Amino acid sequence: MQRRTLLSLPAALALPGQARAADPVKELRLDYATYSPTSLVLKKFGWLEDDLKRDGIAVKWVYSAGSNRALEYLNAGSLDIGSSAGLAALLAKATGTPIRTPYIISR
């Protein structure tokens, strides 16, 4: 029991500094593209806008003409979420592009 307490003490001391809330999101910028049927359906029917409106979040759609373009927009800060083919995301990660992979569409 004593060892467990000692091991958890550094974590407990670090938490108050990490507990600050982030600024609330006002707008979500995401891409839509012909290669991403999911994005086309979400955009066409407005389901994302309807759901996020309750939280006061606007949705901005940005057209991307390919995975590389979506990754460029992400890297430049023009998008919050972008869709990509798996290989394009893998190559971007391999070259050090600071991206996270929220989802990958492949056929």
Image (cartoon, rainbow, N blue to C red):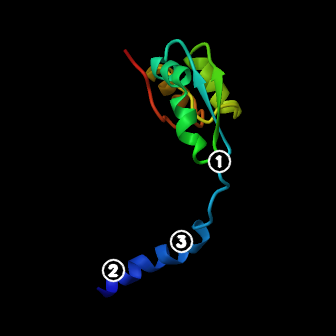
Specify the amino acid type for callout 2: Arg
Q: Please name whichever residue, 74 or 91, is drawn nearer the observer in this view of the structure.
A: 74
Q: Residue at x 53, y 78 (%)?
A: 13
Local SS, label 2: helix
Q: Residue at x 44, y 26 (%)?
A: 104
Pinpoint residue 45: horizontal percent, then vertical percent. 52, 23
Q: Earlier in the sequence, mark 1 or mark 2?
A: 2
Disc 2: which residue:
4
Q: Residues within 10 Å of mark 1 (few under 14, many from 20)?
A: few
For the question of whether residue 22 can be seen, the reply is yes
Image quarter for residue 98?
top right
What is the spatial separation of the Cα atoms under label 2 and label 3, in whole angstroms?
Answer: 17 Å
Q: Please name whichever residue, 77 or 36, is drawn nearer the observer in this view of the structure.
A: 36
Residue 20 higher or lower than 64, as above or below: below
Give the label on residue 15, or none.
Answer: 3
Mark in the foreground, 3 or 1 = 1
Q: Residue at x 53, y 33 (%)?
A: 48
Residue 5 higher or lower than 25, as above or below: below
Residue 32 is left or right of residue 90, and the answer is: right
Q: Residues within 10 Å of mark 3 (few under 14, many from 20)?
A: few
Residue 13 higher or lower than 44, as above or below: below
Local SS, label 3: helix
Pinpoint residue 7: horizontal percent, then vertical percent. 39, 77
Residue 73 is left or right of residue 12, and the answer is: right
Give the label on residue 25, or none.
Answer: 1
Give the label on residue 63, or none.
Answer: none
